[in-house]
């Protein structure tokens, strides 16, 4: 069913493209006022504007209908129940042993364990007295 609707959808899309390309633009009527060969047209002196406009409208409606049908088919294929689609995890995750740092490591111990040592300078921050309402300035280094 989906293949048939897709094939119809594709053929209608190509037909719409062809119909639009065969229609005359608004500027094409200016040449007809100077005797521009209206007797040699297939659809008569008025041309096929009415036919092409109606055919384009019909094919546009069919294109809309096949688009809607394909959307419904796609929804039916992917619809799952809320409970049926959720996997149940029955086993617990394996616990991995992560290293813990209880006390600071000295530079000698870090070198022995291949731990990089980062030297961070200490910053002297003055205490803030909240009762005064003023924030002390930070001393420049």
Image (spheres, rainbow, N blue to C red):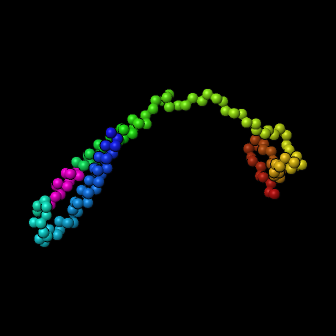
Left or right, residue 17 beside residue 87:
left
- Magenta range is 46-57
* Residue 33 located left or right of residue 136: left
- Residue 75 is situated, as x and y percent measured from the top left of the image, at 40, 37
Query: Residue 104 in the image: x percent, y percent?
Result: 85, 43
Q: Name the residue: 67% across, 33% down.
A: 93
Q: Position of residue 84 (x, y in %)?
A: 49, 29
Judged from this view, the residue extending furthest toward the bottom is: 34
Asked whether residue 77 is drawn in magenta, I would say no
Q: Position of residue 78 (x, y in %)?
A: 43, 36
Against 64, is 24 above or below?
below
Q: Is residue 131 left or right of residue 55?
A: right
Q: How many marks?
A: 0
User: Which of these two is toward me, 26 or 36?
Assistant: 36
Q: Is residue 45 visible?
A: yes
Instruction: Note whether 52 is above or below 32 in the view shown.
Output: above
**Residue drawn at (84%, 47%), measured in percent from left and top?**
113
The N terminus: image quadrant: top left
Query: Would residue 100 be found to the left or right of residue 82 on screen?
Result: right
């Amino acid at each position: 069913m989906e293949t048939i609707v897709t094939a119809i959808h594709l053929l209608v899309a190509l037909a719409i493209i062809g119909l639009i390309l065969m229609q005359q633009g608004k500027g094409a009527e200016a040449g007809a006022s100077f005797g521009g060969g209206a007797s040699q047209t297939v659809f008569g002196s008025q041309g096929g504007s009415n036919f092409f406009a109606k055919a384009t409208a019909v094919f546009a409606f069919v294109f809309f209908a096949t688009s809607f049908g394909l959307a419904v088919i796609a929804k039916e294929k992917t619809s799952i129940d809320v409970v049926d689609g959720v996997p149940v995890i029955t086993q617990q995750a394996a616990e991995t042993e992560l290293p813990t740092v209880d006390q600071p490591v000295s530079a000698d111990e870090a070198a022995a364990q291949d731990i990089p040592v980062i030297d961070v300078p200490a910053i002297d921050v003055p205490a803030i007295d909240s009762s005064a309402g003023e924030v002390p300035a930070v001393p420049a280094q």
